[in-house]
């Protein structure tokens, strides 16, 4: 990255002059690859091989982006602090993509029957937040749970599943709504 007389004002990487169009294109590719990688990581029906290699494709663009930023900093045409923060955030996003996905167990219904009341309450709350209508009959059963924590969580979840309409804390009305 040594400047030559012809390129003394423009930074270069491996002899290629770095111009604003390169900056826009590289940044767009970085953002696009980040979006594709994030989508590939979070899409359940996607080929697992695509999900596995997507962070590494993002890393290729992140390295290119980092080299470009270093070239600009070396030519004194970009703030070192900004470049450091941008490269740091790209590395942090890459590590986020490498982190394992947290899967909700397929047998979430069994968590509604767990012996620990806190687990039952959290499973009920999760069913409400996920709008999981298949769990509604089990949630109706939890309205008769011995724990007030579980009863309250089940009631809140049923209200969410019922589009905010509250049918009370008794299970009869809820059994008619969710047979």
Image (tube, rainbow, N blue to C red):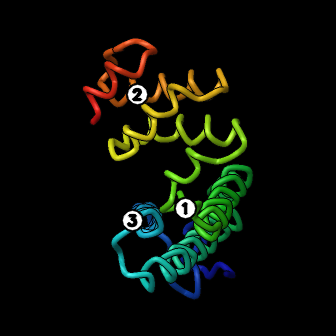
Cα separation, mark 2 vs mark 1, equals 23 Å
**Mark before the other along the chain sequence, 2 or 1:** 1
How many labels sit on residues? 3
Residue at the spot 46% in from the left edge and 77% down from the top edge? 51
**SS of the residue at dot 3?**
loop
Report the mark closest to the observer, 2 or 3: 2
Closer-to-camera residue (55/18): 55
Q: In which image quadrant can residue 140 be found? A: top left
Report the mark closest to the observer, 2 or 1: 2
**SS of the residue at dot 2?**
helix
Above-or-below relation of 28 to 85: below
Closer-to-camera residue (129/115): 115
Residue identifier under label 2: 158
Residue at the spot 72% in from the left edge and 42% down from the top edge? 116
**Mark before the other along the chain sequence, 1 or 3:** 3
- Residue 103's disc is 1
Q: Residues within 10 Å of mark 3 (few under 14, many from 20)?
A: few
Cα separation, mark 1 vs mark 3, equals 12 Å
Q: How far across and down, in percent of the image, does residue 93 sit?
A: 61, 60
Cα separation, mark 2 vs mark 3, equals 27 Å
Q: Residues within 10 Å of mark 1 (few under 14, many from 20)?
A: few
- Residue 43's disc is 3
Quarter of the picture containing the C terminus is top left
Q: How far across and down, in percent of the image, does residue 22 sit?
A: 42, 69
Above-or-below relation of 7 to 117: below
Q: How far across and down, in percent of the image, does residue 35 sit?
A: 42, 61
Report the mark closest to the observer, 1 or 3: 1
**Mark before the other along the chain sequence, 2 or 3:** 3
Quarter of the picture containing the N terminus is bottom right
**Residue 137 shown left or right of residue 4 in the figure:** left
**Residue 104 shown left or right of residue 88 in the figure:** left
């Amino acid at each position: 990255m040594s400047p030559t007389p012809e390129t003394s004002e423009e930074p270069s990487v491996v002899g290629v002059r770095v111009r604003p169009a390169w900056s826009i294109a590289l940044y767009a590719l970085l953002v696009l690859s980040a979006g594709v990688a994030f989508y590939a990581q979070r899409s359940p029906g996607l080929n697992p091989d695509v999900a596995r290699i997507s962070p590494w494709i993002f890393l290729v663009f992140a390295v290119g982006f980092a080299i470009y930023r270093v070239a600009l900093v070396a030519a004194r045409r970009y703030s070192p602090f900004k470049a450091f923060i941008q490269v740091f955030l790209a590395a942090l996003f890459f590590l986020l993509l490498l982190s394992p996905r947290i899967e909700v167990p397929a047998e979430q219904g069994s968590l509604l029957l767990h012996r620990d009341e806190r687990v039952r309450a959290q499973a009920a709350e999760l069913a409400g937040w996920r709008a999981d209508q298949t769990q509604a009959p089990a949630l109706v059963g939890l309205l008769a749970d011995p724990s007030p924590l579980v009863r309250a969580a089940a009631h809140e979840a049923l209200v969410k599943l019922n589009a905010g309409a509250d049918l009370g804390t008794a299970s009869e009305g809820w059994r008619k709504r969710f047979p």
